[in-house]
Amino acid sequence: MIFKGFVVGAYAASPAHRVWDETAELDFYSALENIRDIGALELPWMGSIHPHNPSWLARHLPTRFGAVITDVPHVMGRLAQDSFYGLASSSEEGRSAALADALRMRDDIDAFNNATGRKVVGAVELHSAPQVQGGAADALKRSLAELSSWDWSGAQLVIEHCDAWRDTHAPEKGFLELSEEVAAIENSGTGVGVALNWGRSVIEGRSVTTAVEHARMAREHGLLRGFIASGVSAEETDFGYAWIDAHLPFAPSSITPSGIRSSLMTVANIARVLNEADGVDWLGVKVGSLTHATMAQRVAVVQEAVAALSLALA
């Protein structure tokens, strides 16, 4: 493991992710620091290393935490403006724009490491946008070759697989197939790996077995580096419509009493994937909270998810 504990995508449960509240965020981080099994946070790059105050984050990130940086919120925002934006874009203009943003992210990571006085960022999650009609594995291969030539301060680069396009239903992301991402990585001759998100794999296939199949494929190619447990429901919930990529908590159980009744994410289903993910470099969870949730509820849902992942791993 490259972190001393699990990676937690805590921004999905943060009380100050959308509307900045320094006091609430500080209280939230203090509570996370008290959860023993957390070793790193997954942090969203949205044009900067923190959506509101990068210098605040550098000062207040708990010193025992590492970080995984994901650019997917930024990618989705850019796609809303330009449907050909992305590292896998068949449009050179769209691909160049994505590479330019990746370079800015690389620079922000370097500045963040310098501000914290340590190499806090251990991994960077990249994405194979745009949607499949405008994307190509060969374009992604060329982007990966360029990205890998840059100095990332020792951070591991991975393609985080998101749900691929399916004609049978509207996608949440609709990016390249995992097999295409694997081919692009292998053909690029780089050391880039693959990270999986349980919910996004399940959304793709509308089945919990898709997550198992993805883990097996990535492992068999020797590319599986990271795995995040994040929930989804086949039914409408307070988090939104059926199959929404909203990071639902685990289903209710004795260890996850704050769970969502129709969530497909259970300890048993995550354990099935972990059986295929032998030797993975980092494991984590990402669970969201509803807008009206209290601080105690937000902390509880994260703490329960960490406990559930520990049980699945055991």
Image: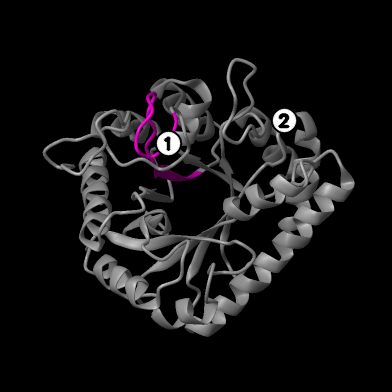
* Residue in view at x 39 percent, y 41 percent: 230
Q: What's the mark number on residue 240?
A: 1
* Residue in view at x 34 percent, y 77 percent: 23
The number of numbered discs placed on residues in the rendered structure image is 2
Is 91 drawn above or below residue 204 in the view shown?
below
Q: Type of residue at label 2?
A: Val
Tell me if residue 4 can be seen: no
For the N terminus, the quadrant is bottom left
- Measuring from the top left, give residue 74's x and y in whole percent: 63, 55
**Residue 233 is drawn in which quadrant?**
top left
* Residue in view at x 53 percent, y 76 percent: 54
Q: What residue span does the magenta drawing correspond to?
A: 225-241
Q: Which residue is mark 2?
A: 132
For the C terminus, the quadrant is top left
Q: Type of residue at label 1?
A: Gly
Is 51 drawn above or below residue 212 in the view shown?
below
Q: Secondary structure at mark 1?
A: loop
Side (left or right) of 149 relative to 54: right
Q: How is the image coloured?
A: one colour
* Residue in view at x 51 percent, y 67 percent: 121
Residue farthest along the front direction in this orientation: 292
Let me know if residue 227 is in the magenta part: yes
Front position in the image: 119 or 21: 21
Magenta stretch: dominant secondary structure: loop
